Image (spheres, grey):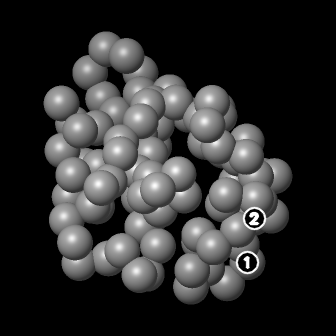
Amino acid sequence: MIIYKTGTESIVADDLEDFFEGWGKKPDPEKRLKILQNSDHIITAHDEGRLIGFINAITDKTLSAYIPLLEVLPAYRGKGIGGELVKRMTE
């Protein structure tokens, strides 16, 4: 069962090792964690305690928001997790 959470309290840098697939120059896991911690909003997806996806947003808290990252591990793609993360973020 997929569990969705807000915030970064349950994430450590090592949880982000398998993300950023296809990026030419990936940020290291510590920087990845810092990116998420400095976001205005973050929602994560977990399967049996493992981080399997996330979405983050930066906002002016007045009118606009920007979603710079939406990541789902390859083994979990095509299962509606990305769509659910977007839905929860836009709510």
**Quadrant in which the C terminus is drawn:** top left
* Cα distance in 3D space between marks 1 and 2: 7 Å
Q: For label 2, count other residues whose C-alpha is less than 10 Å away and answer few (under 14), some (14-19) or many (20+).
A: few
Q: Label 2 belongs to which residue?
A: 27
Q: Residue 57: give x, y in percent of width and height.
A: 43, 38
Q: Residue 65: give x, y in percent of width and height.
A: 34, 33
Residue closest to the eye, 5 or 31? 5
Q: Dot 2 lies on which element?
A: loop
Q: Label 1 belongs to which residue?
A: 25
Residue closest to the eye, 67 or 60? 67
Q: Residue 49: give x, y in percent of width and height.
A: 53, 51
Q: For label 1, count other residues whose C-alpha is less than 10 Å away and answer few (under 14), some (14-19) or many (20+).
A: few
Q: Residue 32: give x, y in percent of width and height.
A: 70, 54
81 displayed left or right of 40: left
> In the image, what residue occupies the spot 57% across and 80% down?
21
Q: Is residue 5 visible?
A: yes
Are the residues at dot 1 and dot 2 in contact (C-beta closer than 8 Å)?
yes
**Quadrant in which the N terminus is drawn:** bottom left
